[in-house]
Amino acid sequence: MENILRPMLEISVVIPGILLAYFPVRSYLKQSPVKLAGWMLPLLLLISILGACISFQLNISTSLFLVIAMLIAVLVYTRTIQVSLWKSFSVALSVCGVFSCINSLSRAINAMLIVHHHSTENELWFSLMGGIIYNAICWGAVVIAYYPATHDVRTIIEDENFAQTWYVFWILPLVFIALNLFMIPTYPNTLYTGRVLQGYIVISLVLLVLLVLFYIMFILAANSLNRNAKLQQENHFLSMQQERYDNLRMAIEEVRQAKHDMRHHFRQLSVMAEAGELEKIKEYLFGAENRIPNLDMQFCENRAADSVIGYYYEMAKRQNIPFHARIDLPPQILVDEIDMCLVISNLLENALEASIKTAVPKREIKVEAYMHKNSLLLIQVENSFDGEVRMKDGVFLSTKRKGNGVGIQSVRRISEKNGGANSFTYTKGVFTAKVMIHG
């Protein structure tokens, strides 16, 4: 029994390894952790037991079965998470790099135990105590790496700004894996020499420390680059949203000015009518008709929201898009009016663009906005759409240019900045956006 347990302990280290690889991607699992562990753990245990039995029967090393178990674990890992192949492969390879260093260190510890106890056990496998220590170090590494894996590494994986970084990261753990494989002595007896064993221990520790330091440096550098990229992106969003708001404000101001100028138009028409200048009245009306917007719609008592919705109502009307609005907003609200106008304008502009691309019979836009308990603004916009909604890792892609969609990202940032929430769903040709903003 002990002779089978020894090789099984060597192969079973793949279990803590795969567990460590799942830490930073646990939010991307395609199935629940309990369900995943329910079939993966027995699978890896079965591979470990079968590999141990075959190694014992044929009296061979466990290296081949460890590689097979590792390849199966990596294949299952990449298929059970919703992360790009390069990222998932790099994470799995980084764990293999750490465990290769631990393997070298454990090999040295095992040699020390054999020398100390003058053991005569089969040297193809670790001694029983050496195998236990090997597993203990692996599980200890999992415990130590839990926090950075679930925080710093997870942040890097979730960030899409530096996807290209993952195309070169794999080189680092691969180099350390190669170094540790190169260190394995051809004959185990070589390690029992005092100076060789001491040097092997020192080199194993140095490689492990260097690898960890390189990982830390990579995480720090990536976080720094990501922060800079996010600041640049924030500035870009702010400038774009400021430009959009300025254009929208100008359009709203034109509507207000048109309302103000109405009485001047009527005064001028009255003067012409008193003078009996019928032809001049016709010419005047013809010239002013296209400049006077339709002012027969009032959606709510809040002037800012009413102006924004009125503007997009006119835009939708020109495109023959049915526009249904249920707006219940008081004149004064606790929510920042600029944030409210930006959210409404972004959602309605996206809805308008999607509806224009939709077949005429299917076109429709619905918007609802109201206050809940005087401090919570709820906004919902529905629109029809044709074609496919493009997404990448949970982020909507723009239909006008290459890259992420600016409008939805802006809405998300505004709602999250104000402690709110948002959701975007699409089914059966209808796209629905729901936004909640705290006052």
Image (spheres, rainbow, N blue to C red):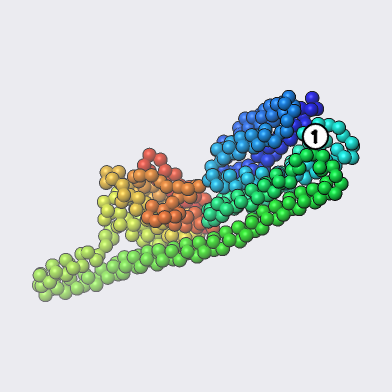
Residue 166 sits above or below residue 245 on the image = above
Q: Is residue 434 left or right of residue 112?
A: left
Residue 425 figure quarter = top left
**Residue 7 location, x and y as percent?**
75, 31
Helix, strand or loop for disc 1 = loop
Quadrant housing the N terminus:
top right
Closest to the observer: 37 or 190? 190
Closest to the observer: 375 or 19? 19
Residue 240 sits above or below residue 34 on the image = below
Q: Can the viewer see residue 34 in this picture?
A: no
Q: Is residue 405 left or right of residue 127?
A: left
**Residue 333 location, x and y as percent?**
47, 59
Q: How packed is label 1: few (under 14 Cα within 10 Å), some, or many (20 or more)?
A: some
**Residue 245 location, x and y as percent?**
41, 64
User: Residue at position x 58%, y 36% from top?
Assistant: 76
Q: Can the viewer see residue 318 in this picture?
A: yes
Q: Is residue 132 left or right of residue 96?
A: right
Residue 414 sits above or below residue 174 on the image = below
User: Residue at position x 62%, y 44% from top?
Assistant: 92
Closest to the observer: 299 or 10? 10
User: Residue at position x 72%, y 54% from top?
Assistant: 210
User: Residue at position x 86%, y 38% from top?
Assistant: 114
The three-letter code of the residue at mark 1 reads: Glu
Residue at numbered disc 1: 123
**Given the current orientation, which residue lies at the most extreme right position?**
117
